Amino acid sequence: MKKPFKTNTTARGLKTTLAGTLALLLTLSARAQTGDGEAGIRQATDMVRGYFDTGTSLMYAIGAIVGLVGAVKVYQKWNAGEPDTGKVAAAWFGSCIFLVVVATVLKSFFGI
């Protein structure tokens, strides 16, 4: 016959005390960080503004690559005489315009 499991009240009290102490330390740590939160947000904003022009240039470069690949694809379809050439050309042109418009709208939206 198995003996019933006994809980050690000392171990349970120690665990409760440790959990309470940990919660108190985490609360104090969180409060210490909130005083400098505004400076952190300002720093993050400055960093994003610094990388925004680079990101916009990257978007234009991706648009150029997609445009060239799409132009070759449309040219091949046109020379082969395939009937869906107009649909492919419209999709290619639309994707190029979308990338340029998104980059421009993001710049004006964020005031950069």
Image (cartoon, helix red, strand yellow):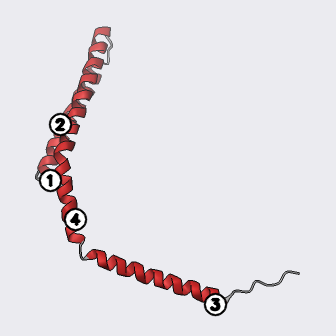
**Residue carrying label 4:** 41
Q: Residues within 10 Å of mark 4 (few under 14, many from 20)?
A: few
Q: Nearer the viewer, mark 2 or mark 4?
A: 4
Residue 100 has which mark? 2
Q: Residue 73, how many percent across, how many down? A: 30, 19
Instruction: Identify the mark nearer the N-term, 2 or 4.
Output: 4
Pointer 1 with pointer 4, Cβ within 8 A:
no
Q: Which label's residue is closer to the chain start, 3 or 2? A: 3
- Residue under circle 1? 110
- Mark nearer the N terminus (3 vs 1): 3
- Residue 10's disc number: 3
The Cα–Cα distance between marks 2 and 4, rounded to whole angstroms, is: 29 Å
User: Which residue is rendered at x = 62% and y = 86% of the image?
Assistant: 12
Tell me the distance, in whole angstroms, between the alpha carbons under discs 3 and 1.
59 Å
Query: Under tag 3, what secondary structure?
Result: helix
112 shown above or below 65: below
In primary-sequence order, the first of circles 4 and 3 is 3
With respect to residue 108, does 76 lie above or below? above
What kind of residue is marked 4?
Ile
In primary-sequence order, the first of circles 1 and 2 is 2
| Quarter of the rendering occupied by the N terminus | bottom right
